[in-house]
Amino acid sequence: MSVAVAAPERAGGEAALRRLQLLVNRRLDGLLQGDYLGLLPGPGSEAGESREYRAGDDVRRMDWPVTARTTVPHVRLTVADRELETWLAVDLSPSLDFGTARMLKRDLVLAATAAMTHLTVRGGNRVGAVINAGGPELVRRPARPGRREAQGLLRTVARLIEEGGAAREESLGTPRERRAGTSQVPTRPADSLAPLIEALNSPPRRRGLAVVISDFLDPPERWAWQLRKLATRHEVLAVEVLDPCELELPAAGVLELRDPETGARHEVQTGDRDLRRRYAQAAQRQRELIADAVRTAGARQVRLRTDSDWLLDLVRFVAAQRHRRTRGGSR
């Protein structure tokens, strides 16, 4: 079961946020049983036990004394540092104001933010955020420990979603203005994701976990370098949010589509099978380019969809990463 977090009024927004947090707490604690090792950085500074070498292990972790004593290659495991500093790069640009299934993409961004804070805030860990709310300046929340601070971060994201949505609705004008094409839609910079990721690179921060939550619709060549730079110092997780209509167009006749980033409008004949085929091919290629850029950077990636159980998808991802950690695999 998923939940839409739409908040037309302040009181309703607070209530929806509390429902979201309750849902996240119950399901993540129940399904992961309190062990979030799959999300935390694996190698740490504290020495752990040794085990036999397996193909793919990092040879720099060879435990030579044990290897000499047993005549069998062994590697030294290290315990992940538990006082973790997590930074979230939260994208709330206009392209997130879209959704055709259970929720809008911006609601899914808030849900992912809630899940990430819940997974990383325990044990004195600090969580901070840099948020692109669609304006000229990024919004920053310093990294601080404690659930109260994490809740404050979530309220900030929820408020920015509410304010941004209201401002963009106002910019669309009346129905008559929209039909006449005279409404004004503010545009965002062509490379809005790159500055958001770069904000986690500068100033330099202590090593930890960096989570980028976005639809990644900016061309990868505009943000791939910043992501690679981020991954040289931090464990990086890319959370990609998407809607099924971004993958395939429905056969719904003539649709008037508006680009939320530029305000440009186009009429599209979705009954054209060839157009739908070309659209699906282009969308598939776009997803491949995004995945390749994330993989080349050395980051991990999880996709959350507006038409699926996003919490279950996240649990499966964390469980798979935990399995890789315990088997000694590298990222």
Image: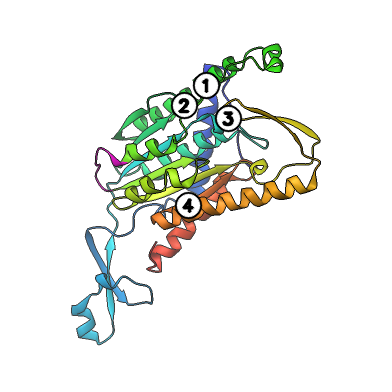
Could you tell me which residue is drawn at 50 percent across and 29 percent down? 18
Main SS category, magenta section: loop
Percent across and percent down for residue 331 are 39, 61
Secondary structure beneath label 2: loop
Badge 1 crowding class, 10 Å Cα cut-off, few under 14, some 14 to 19, many 20 or more, is some
Which portion, as a residue range, is magenta? 201-207
Tags 3 and 2 in contact by the CB under 8 Å rule?
Answer: no
Q: Which residue is mark 4?
A: 301
Please state, as top left, top right, bottom left or bottom right, where the N terminus lies in the image: top right
As measured in the structure, the alpha-carbon distance from the residue carrying label 1 to the one carrying label 4 is 30 Å
Above or below residue 202? Residue 327 is: below
Name the kind of residue labelled 1 in the image.
Pro
Q: Secondary structure at mark 3?
A: loop
Q: CA distance from mark 2 to mark 1?
A: 9 Å
Q: Going 53% across and 29% down the picture, which residue do you hit?
A: 94
Amino acid bearing label 2 = Gly
Residue type (three-letter) at the residue carrying disc 3: Asp
**Residue 31, can we see it?**
no
Labelled pair 2, 1 in contact (Cβ < 8 Å): yes
Provide the residue designation for mark 3. 97
SS at mark 4 in the image: strand
In the rendered structure, are the residues bearing label 1 and label 4 in contact, judged by CB atoms less than 8 Å apart? no
Q: Is residue 264 left or right of residue 49?
A: right
Q: For the residues carrying marks 3 and 1, which lies nearer the camera in this image?
A: 1
Q: Position of residue 261 (x, y in %)?
A: 55, 29
Mark 3 residue crowding within 10 angstroms, few (<14) / some (14–19) / many (20+): some
Q: CA distance from mark 4 to mark 3?
A: 22 Å
Distance from Cα at disc 3 to Cα at disc 1: 14 Å
Q: Is residue 204 magenta?
A: yes
